Image (cartoon, coloured by chain):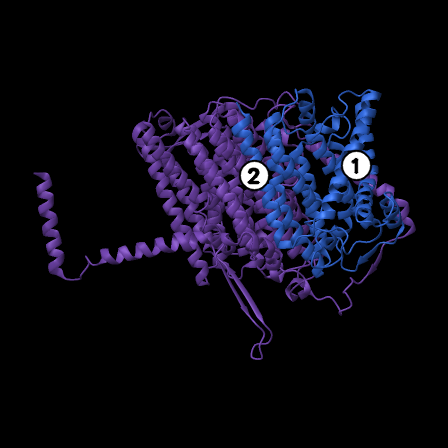
């Protein structure tokens, strides 16, 4: 029972932290570019404002358009309960392994793209078309690099994977380096960050995610924005905990949990800083250069897999 | 007992083929025929289900056929599974049939023909599954093939339809011939045409490879693996939609049944090379199938290419199963087999659902082309929602059924470390990546299909005339959609009831499904992988409810306001400003450019033409590079052989004379 409460706490904590991570990335980015920039907690204010605002729907929007924000939000929230964030051994972790988690994001994206096409404006269709193109290239790279890890740990359960890598004696796997790099590239594409997509722009030549949600307003938009912040946080937690698992709580005592939470915050601040730096030094790519970027991710994950099979299996 | 019930089902299906003849009123005869088909479906599904659950095999010898060659029949778990599938889907489709056939046909004679051959076709499929000797198998197989030829050729007023049907018949016959030869190899060594004699045959490995090769190509032609798939995208758009549903949903599975029966049951020993071949063929079919599907804008042709993709996924599961079986890891071989069979069942359900939905749309609007559709969800809400369920299932998204079988295939692939050869291990890993790419592209394709056809604004006037279909047509779609959801949410129950199939074929079941509760699906062990589908569904519902309740006060305070969509200040939004099916898939077309032969024409605007023109035609490399040259080669060699036939009586006499001399020489 306690474990279930802990799982609920984790979900709530991740949901509450998500806007802070986006705010943190933006804040660091502004500091690096010598701008004043908004405070890190600005996303909370934005979400609160959007919640209060009126929802304006297009006249011929179908019920699917109204259901999509709720669906996307709940699927992402469920994903946040599955990923091991500050403790392993939570009962929710067994609900879904990493393949199912990729499936959750795919489900959210499926409905979001449909919602983009629902109103019948050119923008929505454009965003949906680009989104499914990019994700259909990103998904195999992501799964392949995760498969490398799961073959090492003989499991696709995230919880078991993290637990296994903590309890094993430390050893450097060459395949992990490739997979980690590949996952970083995929995560930038999946979360719609520079160089694949730019969350700060509303220029039709470059929009992907923003084009799909262009017709949303008010609380619907708030749910979608929150879900995309949460998705970025989940990717951050996932990558850091898979490759730098140290600090995560192995048993549900107060001290280990406190250490786990603290280490999670430090890891997230770190990966947020990495993202901010990379977004400051890179420029947004043309849409048709995105396949090159993603095929690089795919090649890296393939190299990881091959080096695992060749070098690490005895 | 259950075998007799299955035979009753066959008799009912044959009755359904005879009944339309004497009854004059066309509506009555069609309704009666479909009622009989429905009953036969229920009987066969029940018999099949019971046969699948029981661990033993039932057999009987019927005094039908040649005097010295009676027909052997049997029902074992594998046959029972496929009988359940065929019976279930044809039972549900016969709810859909009557109104669809009556409303879409004007000519009563052709409607009668349709009803007759539907009955024969379904009876043929039942008999293929029940057959326990090569003779009955081949007779039933040909009954199925020829009857379905007449169904494809049903609308024979247009030349392209008869051509499509002819190609289908040609390939079905070529495939049938190869299957016959493969049975011949086994019968030659096994001393008899019954399956039990063939099981006991001891073949030298050389002949085993030959028999496997013949069966692989023969059954593959019917199943539609690349490059033997070319009949599928031609035949499906032509056939009536409920027939497409049966052909794609069920008949392809009968071919898969034949292949599994031949390899696992009759040949017995599995060589690792076969696993490699089947796995590679599966990868190629899955990837090329989905890539070709993405480029189609004829709804039914698109769905036909998706059948190629799904058969590919089934073959991937089978190939993995073969690899593990040849390496003596029977529990993992069982896992691969279960994954393949589960995908067979899922594909049967969601593909018939999608074809029935497509039939409803085409019946209402009269349009096949996605680029003419749009906005149908508001006019046909129930068909739309069912079609959406089909789209989610085929895109392998949780918590629906397509996801479960792909997840199982992934899990099988990840156990590849149990094999010894490093090359095969890395090949399996790449195959898993190919499966991931297939799934993602399938999702892209069905975003396109649903988004273009059911969402947005109507692209032609015809769409505005559409309205919801009749109760029977709705009912069958709802039933199929519900079973997609059920198989997605309770996979453990379904897999536990399939346990007897690997137990009979491989001598072992899955390792750990029995030890866990119905909540968790753990194919290997609870530590290695788990998927709690009921928890996923309830988790989504709880989170949804939470968000709804959280936002409820806001909803009371500021209700939703409706207004026209923002048009950027350029005047009213038109249906033509929307993305079309072709523009939606343009980025993918550009990325995977060499995969298709593309004929693209851009005519710039000029005074003579009213505005510019753009046309694109996407062909099929298999057709251009393999079948057309083959056809030309056959024609050219036929012309050379035809020189023998000079029409001169003296030459013919000379032929006879020389033949006689050669014969005499051989005799002496």
Q: Position of residue B437 (x, y in %)?
A: 58, 43
- The residue drawn where x is 56% and y is 79% is B608
Would you identify the image quadrant in which residue B397 lies? top right
Q: Secondary structure at mark 1?
A: helix
How far apart, in angstroms, are the residues tagged by discs 2 and 1? 32 Å
Q: Is residue B546 above or below residue B659?
A: above
Q: Colour of chain A?
A: blue
Chain on which label 2 sits: B
Q: Position of residue B331 (x, y in %)?
A: 53, 23
Would residue B44 be seen by someone viewing this image from the given angle? no
Q: Nearer the viewer, residue A105 or B1?
A: A105
Q: Nearer the viewer, residue A130 or B26?
A: A130
| Chain purple in the figure, letter | B
Q: Position of residue B373 (x, y in %)?
A: 63, 60
Q: Which mark is residue A269?
A: 1
Would residue B466 be seen by someone viewing this image from the given angle? yes
Would you identify the image quadrant in which residue B542 lies? top right
Residue that label 2 marks:
B433
Would you identify the image quadrant in which residue B563 lies? bottom right
Q: Position of residue B82 (x, y in %)?
A: 51, 35
Q: Secondary structure at mark 2?
A: helix
Q: Residues within 10 Å of mark 1 (few under 14, many from 20)?
A: some
Q: Quadrant of the C terminus of chain B?
A: top left
Left or right: residue B195 versus residue B460 is left
Left or right: residue B577 versus residue A269 is left
- The residue drawn where x is 32% and y is 27% is B204
Q: Nearer the viewer, residue A227 or B480?
A: A227
Q: Nearer the viewer, residue B610 or B514?
A: B610
């Amino acid at each position: 029972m306690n474990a279930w409460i802990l799982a609920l706490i984790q979900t709530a904590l991740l949901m509450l932290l998500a806007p802070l991570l986006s705010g943190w990335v933006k804040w660091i980015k502004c500091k690096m570019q010598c701008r004043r920039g908004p405070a890190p907690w600005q996303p909370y204010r934005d979400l609160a404002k959007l919640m209060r605002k009126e929802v304006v729907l297009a006249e011929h929007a179908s019920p699917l358009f109204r259901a999509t924000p709720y669906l996307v939000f709940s699927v992402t929230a469920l994903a946040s309960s599955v990923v091991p964030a500050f403790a392993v051994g939570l009962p929710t972790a067994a609900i879904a392994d990493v393949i199912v988690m990729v499936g959750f994001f795919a489900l959210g994206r499926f409905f979001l793209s449909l919602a983009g096409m629902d109103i019948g404006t050119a923008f929505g269709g454009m965003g949906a078309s680009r989104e499914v193109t990019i994700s259909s290239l990103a998904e195999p790279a992501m799964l392949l690099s995760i498969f490398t890890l799961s073959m090492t740990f003989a499991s696709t359960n995230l919880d078991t994977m993290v637990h296994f890598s903590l309890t094993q004696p430390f050893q450097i796997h060459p395949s992990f380096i490739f997979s980690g790099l590949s996952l970083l590239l995929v995560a930038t594409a999946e979360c719609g960050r520079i160089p694949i997509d730019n969350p700060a722009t509303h220029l039709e030549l470059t929009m992907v995610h923003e084009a799909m949600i262009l017709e949303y307003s008010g609380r619907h938009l708030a749910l979608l924005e929150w879900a995309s912040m949460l998705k970025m946080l989940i990717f951050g937690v996932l990558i850091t905990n898979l490759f730098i698992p140290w600090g995560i709580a192995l048993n549900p005592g107060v001290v280990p949990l406190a250490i786990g939470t603290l280490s999670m915050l430090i890891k997230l601040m770190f990966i947020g800083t990495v993202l901010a730096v990379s977004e400051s030094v890179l420029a947004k790519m043309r849409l048709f250069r995105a396949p090159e970027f993603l095929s690089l991710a795919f090649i890296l994950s393939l190299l990881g897999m091959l080096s695992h099979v060749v070098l690490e299996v005895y | 007992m259950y075998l007799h019930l299955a035979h009753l089902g066959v008799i009912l299906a044959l009755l359904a083929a005879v009944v339309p003849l004497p009854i004059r009123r066309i509506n009555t005869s069609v309704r009666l025929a479909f009622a009989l088909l429905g009953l036969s479906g229920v009987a066969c599904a029940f018999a099949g289900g019971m046969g699948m659950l029981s661990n033993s095999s039932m057999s009987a010898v019927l005094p039908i056929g040649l005097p010295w060659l009676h027909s052997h029949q049997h029902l074992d778990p594998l046959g029972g599974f496929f009988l359940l599938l065929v019976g279930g889907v044809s039972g549900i489709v016969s709810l859909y049939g009557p109104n669809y056939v009556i409303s879409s046909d004007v000519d009563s004679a052709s409607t009668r023909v349709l009803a007759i051959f539907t009955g024969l076709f379904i009876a043929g499929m039942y008999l293929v599954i029940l057959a326990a000797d090569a003779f009955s198998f081949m007779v039933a197989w040909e009954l199925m093939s020829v009857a379905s030829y007449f169904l494809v050729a049903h609308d024979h007023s247009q030349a392209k339809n008869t051509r499509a049907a002819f190609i289908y018949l040609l390939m079905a016959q070529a495939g049938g011939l190869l299957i016959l030869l493969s049975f011949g190899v086994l019968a030659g060594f096994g001393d008899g045409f019954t399956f039990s004699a063939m099981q006991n045959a001891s073949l030298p490995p050389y002949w085993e490879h030959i028999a496997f090769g013949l069966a692989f190509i023969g059954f593959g032609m019917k199943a539609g693996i690349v490059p033997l798939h070319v009949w599928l995208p031609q035949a499906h758009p032509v056939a009536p939609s409920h027939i497409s549903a049966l052909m794609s949903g069920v008949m392809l599975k009968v071919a898969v049944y034949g292949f599994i029966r031949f390899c696992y049951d009759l040949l017995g020993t599995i060589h690792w090379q076969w696993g490699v071949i089947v796995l590679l063929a599966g990868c190629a079919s899955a990837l090329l199938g989905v890539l070709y599907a993405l480029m189609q804008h004829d709804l039914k042709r698109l769905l036909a290419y998706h059948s190629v993709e799904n058969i590919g996924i089934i073959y991937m599961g089978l190939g993995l199963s073969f690899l593990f079986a040849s390496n003596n890891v029977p529990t993992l071989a069982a896992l691969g087999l279960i994954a393949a069979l589960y995908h067979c069942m899922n594909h049967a359900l969601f593909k018939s659902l999608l074809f029935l939905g497509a039939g409803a749309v085409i019946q209402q609007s009269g349009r096949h082309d996605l680029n003419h559709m749009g906005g149908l969800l508001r006019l046909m809400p129930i068909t739309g929602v069912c079609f959406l369920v089909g789209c989610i299932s085929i895109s392998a998204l949780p918590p629906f059924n397509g996801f479960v079988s792909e997840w199982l295939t992934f899990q099988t692939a990840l156990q590849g470390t149990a094999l010894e050869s490093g090359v095969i291990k890395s090949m399996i890993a790449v195959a898993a990546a190919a499966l991931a790419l297939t799934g993602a592209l399938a999702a892209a394709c069905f975003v396109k299909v649903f988004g273009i056809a059911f969402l947005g604004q109507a692209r032609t006037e015809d769409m505005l005339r559409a309205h919801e279909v009749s109760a029977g047509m709705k009912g069958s779609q709802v039933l199929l959609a519900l079973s997609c959801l059920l198989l997605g949410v309770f996979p453990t129950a379904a897999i536990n009831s399939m346990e007897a199939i690997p137990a009979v074929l491989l001598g072992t079941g899955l390792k750990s499904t029995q030890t866990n509760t119905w909540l968790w699906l753990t194919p290997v062990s609870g530590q290695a992988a788990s998927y709690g589908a009921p928890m996923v569904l309830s988790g989504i519902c709880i989170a949804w409810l939470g968000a709804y309740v959280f936002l409820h006060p806001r909803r009371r305070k500021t209700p939703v306001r409706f207004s026209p969509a923002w048009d950027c200040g350029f005047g009213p939004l038109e249906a033509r400003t929307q993305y079309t099916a072709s523009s939606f898939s343009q980025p993918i077309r550009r990325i995977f450019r060499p995969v298709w032969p593309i004929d693209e024409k851009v005519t710039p605007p000029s005074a003579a033409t009213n505005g510019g023109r753009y046309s694109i035609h996407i062909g099929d490399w298999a057709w251009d590079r393999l079948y057309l040259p083959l056809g030309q080669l056959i024609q050219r060699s036929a012309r050379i052989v035809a020189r023998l036939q000079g029409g001169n009586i003296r030459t013919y006499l000379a032929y006879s004379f020389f033949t006689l001399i050669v014969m005499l020489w051989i005799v002496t």
